[in-house]
Image (cartoon, rainbow, N blue to C red):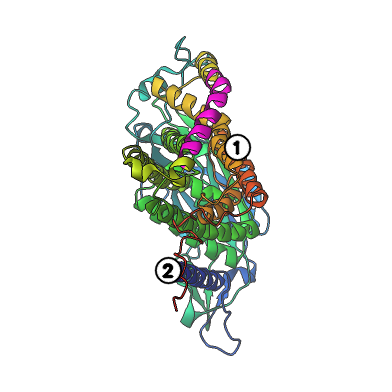
Amino acid sequence: MLNRSSFTTLVVGVFIVYVVHTCWVMYGIVYTKPCESHSDNCIKPYLSKRPKLQLSVYTTTRTSISAENNVDLVLNVDNFDVESRFERTVNVTVPKKTRNNGTLYAYIFLHHAGVLPWHDGKQVHIVSPLTTYMVPKPEEVNLITGGSGTQQIDTEKKESHTALDEPVSHWRSRLTLNVMVEDFIFDGSSLPADVHRYMKMIQLGKSVHYLPILFIDQLSNRVKDLMMINRSTTELPLTVSYDKISLGKLRFWIHMQDAVYSLQQFGFSEKDADEVKGIFVDTNLYFLALTFFVAAFHLLFDFLAFKNDISFWKKKKNMVGMSTKAVLWRCFSTVVIFLFLLDEQTSLLVLIPAGIGAVIEVWKVKKALKISFQWRGATPAIKFGSCSESEKKTEEYDTQAMKYLSYLLYPLCVGGAVYSLLNVRYKSWYSWLINSFVNGVYAFGFLFMLPQLFVNYKMKSVAHLPWKAFTYKAFNTFIDDIFAFIITMPTSHRLACFRDDVVFLIYLYQRWLYPVDKTRVNEYGESYEEKPKRKPHMN
């Protein structure tokens, strides 16, 4: 017990150190120490001189340009005011090279008004691709009639769906620009590395100035805004939006974009990275900070729940008070949910924990079946006793509960599967099968928890349950309620988070209702009253 407590304490200690260190790092990102007034290394903002500026956006298929040749001007903003936000939509001509899976780049220049950008020595510019490559989403059809639900489908679009494994060029329909507008004076001897790569400095007299810091918000490029490009596309819309940005938010955004880029280098797809972007873009900074702490505690409770669950089942010697059918159902439902999330190409933030949970549930089923077979094959001398009688009662209550549930459950599941086959469109028969299973799991999953609740009711005890693991899972269930509104996931999976709340509340009510039976084993296979009694002292 001491070793187990020491390990848990160590994990919690490491977690606290990690949270404190992360808070310190975040503080260092959002806070930048300004330059001392008497220092000779100060770098002043060029915007403090209030120059007349112009914003120009060009498109080209080349990775670099040095003149006005082979570029198209798509947006020109005279008398550009860095303090005023705007949003404009323009039509961009798509070159033939881009229509054939080529790349089109946007060059954004901020320069003096009335001067061409390549003739302005004080201009700043930044480059961003307007196209990206992604595997198109498979078309969904009615499996009975074969209809897709659309009246007209472009021929080339249908042909492009025949090779679903190959990524095709998609158009980024949004371009979000920012300029750092604070009159902040940097210390040249300690420039932040994240901002430094976006800075361009010039010498004006005896002082050094930095030109306006132009930034492209790549986190605002979402998958929902992508448009597939085919060979017949000649023009596509581009929405250019601008807003000012503070230095603290700029530095934070740079670090977040670098983090998303690192995820993509590690193999995250555009869709997976989009889920991470949504956490930052669709929430304000205060809610984002809350999300960080929630995610950190979710990770801690996940680890502790898995650890205690495995520890409980490793030491389990019998199935007294445990519903075998509930264990089998949890395994089946967890695997089905994992396959469903995999088929829906859900975010890895949701998929990976579901996969780990499925592996653990499969292992628990093997352990439960092994225990059951050992007791059924045991000798009468071993079977004789209260443990065997309790196990027999558990099996009887378990079978009785499932008998009542089957009258309601099976007709509803079959009826739902037939209804969805006739009225809902799917990518394939496998997709329909997985969706039918998972709809039954989500809609009626809590009913399969009832056998365990029924066993608890009949035995008037809950001491046989792994309560430490349940406690950690209960915390995670309520944390999942918060994540249900933050991370993109199927609606049925989101509703299931709230369904689990009800089940855990019933378990907690039963724990309060039934007194603790100290003769039963706890989650570590131990009993408070199994120590041998001392023999009386013989004189």
State how far apart marks 2 and 1 are (Cα). Answer: 35 Å
Where the N terminus falls, by quadrant? bottom left
Residue type of the residue flagged with mark 2: Phe
Ranked by sequence position, the earlier of labels 2 and 1 is 2
Residues 135 and 446: in front is 446
Residue 164 rendering spot, x and y as whole percentages? 35, 28
Relative to 358, residue 245 above or below: below
Q: Secondary structure at mark 2?
A: helix
Q: Secondary structure at mark 1?
A: helix
Q: Which region of the structure is painted magenta? A: 391-411
Relative to 317, residue 449 above or below: above
Question: Which residue is farthest bottom?
Answer: 38
Q: Quadrant of residue 498?
A: top right
Residues 120 and 434: in front is 434
- Would you say 82 lies left or right of 536 here? right
Relative to 377, residue 216 above or below: below
State how many labels appear.
2
Residue 525 rendering spot, x and y as whole percentages? 44, 56
Q: Is residue 397 magenta?
A: yes
Q: Identify the residue at image location x=31%, y=41%.
A: 379
Question: Can the viewer see residue 367 in this picture?
Answer: no
Residue type of the residue flagged with mark 1: Leu
Q: Identify the residue at image location x=58%, y=21%.
A: 408
Residue 231 rendering spot, x and y as whole percentages? 38, 26
- Would you say 380 lies left or right of 536 here? left
Question: Which residue is farthest top?
Answer: 145
What is the magenta segment's predominant secondary structure?
helix
- Would you say 349 lies left or right of 84 here? left
Q: Which mark is residue 495?
A: 1
Q: Quadrant of residue 460?
A: top right
Q: Is residue 87 magenta?
A: no
Q: Which mark is residue 7?
A: 2
